[in-house]
Image: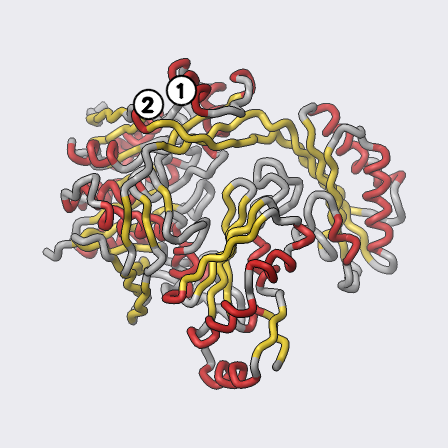
Amino acid sequence: MLKLKLHALAHARAGDKGNRLNISLIAYSSEVYPLLKDRVTEQTVAAWFAHRTPSRVKRYELPKLSALNFVIDDILDGGVTQALNLDSHGKTLSYHLLDMPIDVPADIVISKSQSGD
Amino acid sequence: MSERILVGAGAGYSGDRLDASIAVVGNLCASGERAAIIFETLGERTLALAQLRRKQNPRLGYEPKLKELLTPVLKECVDSGVTVLGNFGAANPIAASDVIAEVGIEVGVRPRIGIITGDDMLSPEGLEVLRACCDNLPDSKLLASANVYLGAEPIVEALNEGAQVVVTGRVADPSLTLGPVIHAFGWSFQDWPRLGRATMAGHLLECGAQVTGGYFADPGFKDVPGPERIGYPIAEIDRDGNFFIGKATGGGLVNRRTVTEQLLYELHDPAEYLTPDVIADISNAELTELPGDRVHVDGVTGRPRSQTLKVTVCYDGGWLGEGEISYYGPNALARARLAGEIVKRRSPRSLRIRCDVIGVLSVLADDSGRAWDSVSNPPGQDLRLRLAFAGPDRNLVERGLAEVEALYCAGPAAGGGIRVALRPRISAISCFVPRSAICPKVEIRESRSC
């Protein structure tokens, strides 16, 4: 097992509606998707964003797109019309998710680097 | 001619690149196919700001860049039969139609303009509907705007009457695409699977470059060719609503990654993407990458639309002040944090105040600042303190900003580069009204020669 940041395995985009943020997490290759599904859960994401006190994290699975969609409630200090954050939309937080380390079996890392994907 | 329509995007928000539409229109015209171009320029609060401009001058309140957006492409669109659709009417679609007609005269065309209104709910009748549906409606003196999201139906009506340019206020973003597609193929407004598919084409188009390599580049991981001249998206939509996403000539790229990011952008439950027209379902969507920056989108469907429509109500949100100052070199972080403390101690107690140190901890933290307890990254030496103040009273927020200014002489050592800014804030809430309470209006304006 190796520790890798999600940034090495997946890409992401955040979008806001009011005080709700969604972050898509998309595997660079379909063989990594099961690993993301296993490691990046509602619980681990809630814990990773704990300092923003989410009231709820809901995960939707899109296996045909090798993607997970996280809907995170109440982490934007009221959202774009209320928050004092420079990034009141929470747009930069997709890269906070990508900063999360997960345990990765060594063979996946090797096959990923070989495919160059 | 093949049984399809091309829909391109010329703008994805108010403030988007003004030259983006030129390549899109060039490609649409060169195709010789049935085509439309959409301009999406209305964010959640944009309309409130437009409404405030209209209050000051009844001839304003439309997209301020409308003229610059249309001047480069209007003639070519009208001459080639490319329909132009935009929510650039904002708070005043009728005044926007004057501008469109003027631009037409300047470039030598006289388009038939369809004007969609009926989204504005600030009238006494509209407010009555809102009061009945919305528990937490602010006092009407504070209201800046209240607009219901209209769907594709009035757009189709305008196109049926021969409109070459359609100008709207608030309509759901994907409806700008769905309208010309329904019109082209004569779909029923209850053909849910087809409406669902074309709605997702609209969803991918509505943010412009965000599906063609904009908002995507991560050097070394996700590289984007020619990011300074990204070709904006063009969807090729068939009679069944299945579609390809491609792009106009220029930089950028379209692949599974760009399309997946945008498909899920601002989306919650993938099985329930709600618009006024349909509930679209992408939970079984599949993407096929093709050569030449094209992706085929398959497996989208739709279900009957909801019986309510969403209204965004914007109201006076008080004032936001922001002040910044830089510190450099040894002990910069300690000096920056001390400056923040000094300003906090001296500012009016009723203000909400936030303190960031850009380069150490800013956007990651929440307003309470609790993340400062666990800052572990070693501070750089080139730091910028940012203070944000919010409150209902302009004078109090100004007093907070004055304390930032005073850091020059009375703060910690060697602070420099103070900037302060003050602006009014718009707050927004959403509520839902019965569809039956809303009556969109379609007006056709013939441009006459002057």
| Residue B446: image location, x then y, percent | 20, 26
Numbered mark located on residue B437 in the image? 2
- How dense is the environment of label 1, judged by Cα within 10 Å: few (below 14), some, or many (20 and up)? some
**Height in image: B389 above or below A41?**
above
Point 72% across, 29% down: residue: B397
Badge 1 vs badge 2, beta-carbon distance below 8 Å: yes
| Residue A45: image location, x then y, percent | 59, 59
Q: Nearer the viewer, residue B449 or B34?
A: B34
For marks 1 and 2, give the CA distance: 7 Å
| Residue B262: image location, x then y, percent | 41, 56
Kindly tell me whether residue B25 is visible in this rendering: no
Mark 2 belongs to which subunit?
Answer: B
Instruction: Assign a secondary structure to mark 2.
Output: helix
The amino acid on which the numbered mark 1 sits, given as a three-letter code, is Val
| Same-chain check, marks 1 and 2 | yes
Q: Is residue A59 left or right of residue B179?
A: right
Point 87% across, 57% down: residue: B331
Viewport quadrant of the N terminus of chain B? bottom left
Q: Is residue B93 left or right of residue B415?
A: left
Residue beneath label 1, please? B129
Lower sequence index among marks 1 and 2: 1
